[in-house]
Image (cartoon, grey):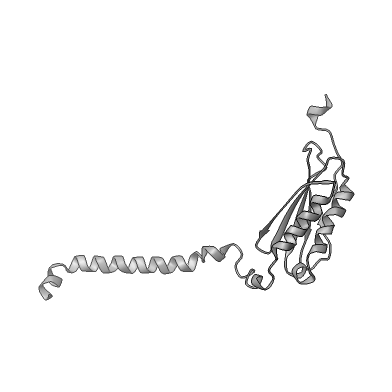
Amino acid sequence: MGKFIKNHRYTLILVLIFALIVLLGVKLKSILVPDEGKATYGERLKDIEKYPIDKEVYDSIDAAFAENNNVTKITHRLRGKTIVYSITFKDEVSVANAKTEAAKLLTFFDEETLGYYSIEVYLIKDNEALNNFPIIGMKNPLSKTFSFTKDREITKSDENEE
């Protein structure tokens, strides 16, 4: 055994140095690059299991808006601590009515849920040429109502003026 080590000492030293470099590289990676699964939200989602949202809540919102004659489509998704809704309205719905309809979303959630999640709502029209839409509304956990983007007037594009 001593003769083997003596004859291959440089090879063994290189293998040991390579092993140390690999171990240091793995340790350095764990320090510089955090866990990819938690990197997006960090510790912000640690209590999310205390505030589950039942599928029935989403279903009741979808059913209520489906009965609304002004709404053509509604979709939702949960992104971290943010509930995102996209509501498509018929072209004849005014900005004020669209905002009023969107505010009804808040009545479906209890106070604990509203105090934990942020809610975003995107108000869209079927006709994309009506450029006073989309309107974006946001409600953070500390607020009671939505804050909407500034209202815009319908303007004609350069193509339509000719």
Q: Quadrant of residue 42?
A: bottom right
Figure disc tally: 0
Locate residue 70, reporting x and y percent.
Answer: 85, 46
For residue 62, side relative to residue 101 (left or right):
left
Q: Position of residue 95 (x, y in %)?
A: 87, 47
Q: Position of residue 127 (x, y in %)?
A: 79, 38
Which percent across, then down, holds residue 27? Answer: 42, 69
Q: Looking at the picture, does residue 78 appear above or below residue 134?
A: below
Residue 116 versus residue 132 in the image, above or below: below
**Identity of the residue furthest to the left in this view:** 3
Task: Specify the quadrant of the image occupied by residue 105.
Answer: bottom right
Residue at the spot x=88%, y=45% of the render?
A: 94
The answer to which quarter of the image holds residue 159 is top right
Q: Quadrant of the C terminus?
A: top right
Q: Nearer the viewer, residue 148 or 27?
A: 148
Task: Say if 142 sits above or below 148 in the image.
Answer: below
Q: Residue furthest top?
A: 162
Frontmost residue, 53 versus 138 = 53
Task: Say which of 50 and 155 sits in front.
Answer: 50
Q: Nearer the viewer, residue 23 or 100?
A: 100
Which residue is drawn at the image coordinates 77% and 38% (left, top)?
128
x 86%, y 39%: residue: 154
